[in-house]
Image (tube, helix red, strand yellow):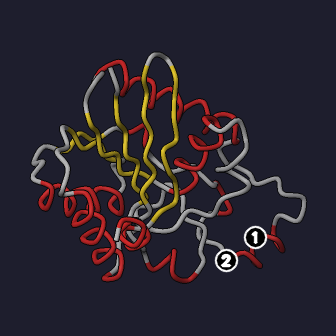
């Protein structure tokens, strides 16, 4: 029995646009982010989906709500464990500000990568246990999703190697205890161009 999990990174926010590090801060998507959510939904609506699960943060939840309306899935489950990585005192800073303030890379209050990786993977496994055989849309965040890709690819891609685009689609399948990453970090435009 195959379980399909399509993880979508939320649409763009103003912090994304300016390059500010965005973790647990509750920043809304901007107009481009809403357009990205609509484009994702238009691509996904040609297949039936059973469930949408979202991070509770506004940027993910609004993305999920836009997608839900278009793919005709009205109930959205909100899982706190899908929240983005907590970046502690580095949150809200631009790259040069982070390097200046934390030259050794040690950031007070930041969730360590292994904790993020375990939290994300455990949530993924719970989805498979709870909704075995279903087709799920999951709306979450860049570092969170990248940690899953890192785990499933044994470090070949994902964290430290892949910069996920806003509104990107990552398709996973689980069957007979095995995970397959069908594709990752694809925008709806890229996927449509592949099939046309």
Q: Which of the labelled discs sits on residue 86, or is there none?
A: none
Q: Is residue 39 above or below residue 87?
A: below
Q: Mark 1 touching mark 2, by CB under 8 A?
A: yes
Compute the Cα span from label 1 to label 2: 6 Å
Q: Mark 2 points at which residue?
A: 94
In the rendered image, the vertical position of residue 16 relative to residue 90, given as above or below: below
Measured as percent of width and height from the top left, residue 143 is found at 58, 53
Q: How crowded is mark 2: few (under 14 residues within 10 Å), some or many (20 or more)?
A: some
Q: Where in the figure is residue 88, as x and y percent of width and height? A: 64, 54
User: Could you tell whether 20 is left or right of 192 in the image?
Assistant: right
| Residue at 34 percent of width and 45 percent of height | 138
In this view, which residue lies farthest toward the front?
196
Between 116 and 166, the one lying in front of the other is 166
Which residue is found at the position 51% from the left and 81% from the top?
17
Which image quarter: residue 136?
Answer: top left
Under circle 2, the secondary element is loop
The N terminus - image quarter:
top left
Mark 1 lies on a secondary structure that is helix
**Residue at (30% x, 65% y) in the render:** 40
What residue did someone put label 1 on?
Answer: 98
Residue at the spot x=28%, y=24% of the render?
133
Q: In this view, does 133 lie to the left or right of 97?
A: left
């Amino acid at each position: 029995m195959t379980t399909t999990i399509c993880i979508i990174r939320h649409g763009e926010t103003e912090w994304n646009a300016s390059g500010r590090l965005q973790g647990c801060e509750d920043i809304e998507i901007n107009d481009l982010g809403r357009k990205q959510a609509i484009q994702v939904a238009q691509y996904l609506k040609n297949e039936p989906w059973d469930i949408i699960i979202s991070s509770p943060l506004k940027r993910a939840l609004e993305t999920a709500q836009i997608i839900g309306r278009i793919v005709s899935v009205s109930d959205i489950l909100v899982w706190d464990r899908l929240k983005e990585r907590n970046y502690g005192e580095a949150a809200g800073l631009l790259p040069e500000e982070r390097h200046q303030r934390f030259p050794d890379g040690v950031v007070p209050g930041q969730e360590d990568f292994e904790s993020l990786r375990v939290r994300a993977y455990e949530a993924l496994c719970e989805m498979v246990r709870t909704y075995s055989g279903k087709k799920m849309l999951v709306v979450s965040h860049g570092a969170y999703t990248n940690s899953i890709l890192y785990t499933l690819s044994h470090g070949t891609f994902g964290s430290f190697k892949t910069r996920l685009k806003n509104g990107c689609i990552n398709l996973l399948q689980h069957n007979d205890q095995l995970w397959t990453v069908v594709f990752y970090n694809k925008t709806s435009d890229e996927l449509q161009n592949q099939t046309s």
